[in-house]
Image (cartoon, helix red, strand yellow):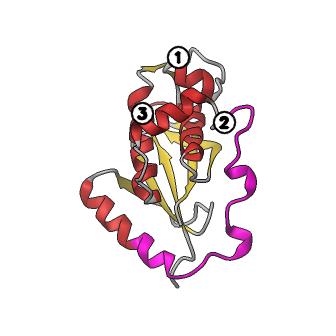
Amino acid sequence: GRPSAIVACLDAGVAWALAGFWQARQAARVELAAAATTARRARVAAARDEEAPKEEKPKEEDSAPNSLIQSDDPAVKELANLIVPEGVTDPIVVALALEKGVRAHINKRNYGQAFATAAEVVRSQEGDCTEHAVLLAAVCRAKKIPARVVLGLVYYPKQSGFAYHMWNEVWIG
């Protein structure tokens, strides 16, 4: 059957379109190219026809600022508004633009931070996947798009094994 909702998992240049809210089953890797964006829009449009079950919708904490994801920080809000001007409301367009903007904003990719907050990252402009993830969640929330960070393992071919990684899940349905 058709999925009840769509979540976009954004990760430093790659979007994972996921069937079902916050669920990673049947994930399909999609490059953030114009052609892929058109296909993704069609899938989301179809998914929006059916309302997600109540228990699958975002929770309040997926939209609220907290000690790591300070979506209410003035510099975080400023970055969100710089990337996506007021009036742009399509959650897919906003989320993809924010992902690209955060990737461009963090211009020092390194492991120098143990785990920085969104407020620290927006100012230092440095970090690895954890800093990208907390800042992206913060700017999404600043734009009223529920988002959260996810920690897990990904296959790392250079080491022929798995490595810890952090990415985002963003509610766009």
Magenta-colored stretch includes residue 59: yes
Q: Which element carries disc 3, helix, strand or loop?
A: helix
Rendered location of residue 119, percent (x, y): 62, 25
Q: Is residue 33 magenta?
A: no
Residue 130, by quadrant, is top right
Position of 62 compared to 2: left or right? right
Q: Cα distance, mark 3 to mark 2?
A: 17 Å
Mark 2 residue type = Ile
On the image, numbered disc 3 is attached to which residue?
A: 103
Q: Give the class, few, some or many, for how many residues have Cα within 10 Å of label 3's Cα (few <14, many ≥20).
A: some
Q: Which residue is mark 2?
A: 69
Residue 164 shows up from this direction: no
Residue denoted by label 1: 124
Question: In what element is the residue under mark 2?
Answer: loop
25 or 120: nearer the viewer? 120
Q: Residues within 10 Å of mark 2 (few under 14, many from 20)?
A: many
Mark with earlier residue (3, 2): 2
